[in-house]
Image (spheres, rainbow, N blue to C red):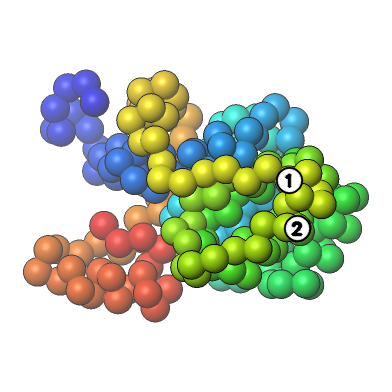
Amino acid sequence: VPGKPSDYSDDMLNNLLTLADVMATGYHAAATAEVKEGDTVVVMGDGAVGLCGVIASKLRGAKRIIAMSRHEDRQKLAKEFGATDIVAERGDDAVKKVLEMTNGGADAVLECVGNELAVETAVKVGRPGAVIGRVGIPQTPTMNTNDLFWRNTGLRGGIAAVTTHDNAILLDAVLNGKINPGKVFTETFDLDHIEDAYEAMDQRTAIKSL
């Protein structure tokens, strides 16, 4: 980052901080899912990474971005970040709704949760030939990949290549005011109250604690 901390507002510093973690991870999901101009994208997960996945999908030119979210504050931020649609349903109901909305499934799916239901849903909401970008930390030891085979679905992802994405795209986008991912920080704590910071995220009273 050019200059020194005092050159920037608190809001800009918050934006820059996300590049060390959630914004780069959300972008990694979009990049591994091969999101491109004109795509329809489904984003699984409405935490900070999922919301940054919405930003990344828009940055990469997606024309329709469906955010899966059941929380009003996160739905609002997803829309602000570029989501065109919100789906609050889960499981089979979510799959049915997305397939109806997209006439057969999305071009790309960003899996930003990591649990089995999210991965299963991600496979089902993509059209045949879709690619899933998976960045949710796996919460179960095994996963049945047979459904991927029958739909020619690609599954890629893992730990974010943070410095690669930052150097190429994200830092420039933040400094030019094109994206404002720092808005995912909705509560601030000092280090003496770090346990409260984690508790706030666990209880969904904060999207991301600063």
Q: Which residue appears at 14% of the width and 63% of the height?
A: 190
Q: Which mark is residue 153?
A: 1
- Residue 209: x, y in percent? 30, 62
Quadrant position of residue 201: bottom left
Identify the element where label 2 is drawn: helix
Can the viewer see residue 74?
no
Q: CA distance from mark 1 to mark 2?
A: 8 Å
Q: Is residue 144 left or right of residue 140?
A: right
Q: Residue furthest left?
A: 192
Identify the element where label 1 is drawn: loop
Q: Amino acid at mark 1?
A: Thr
Q: Which mark is residue 35?
A: none
Seen in the picture, residue 36 relative to 129 is either above or below; the reply is: above
Tag 2 or tag 1, which sits nearer the N-term?
A: 2
Q: Is residue 188 left or right of residue 107?
A: left
| Residue under pointer 2 | 147
In the rendered view of the protein, which quadrant contains the C terminus?
A: bottom left
Can the viewer see residue 207?
yes
Q: Which residue appears at 73% of the width and 35% of the height?
A: 39
Q: Amino acid at mark 2?
A: Asp
- Residue 188: x, y in percent? 25, 61
Q: Which residue appears at 71% of the width and 72% of the height?
A: 91
- Residue 16: x, y in percent? 30, 37
- Residue 193: x, y in percent? 15, 71
User: Mark 1 and 2 residues: CB-CB less than 8 Å, in contact?
Assistant: yes
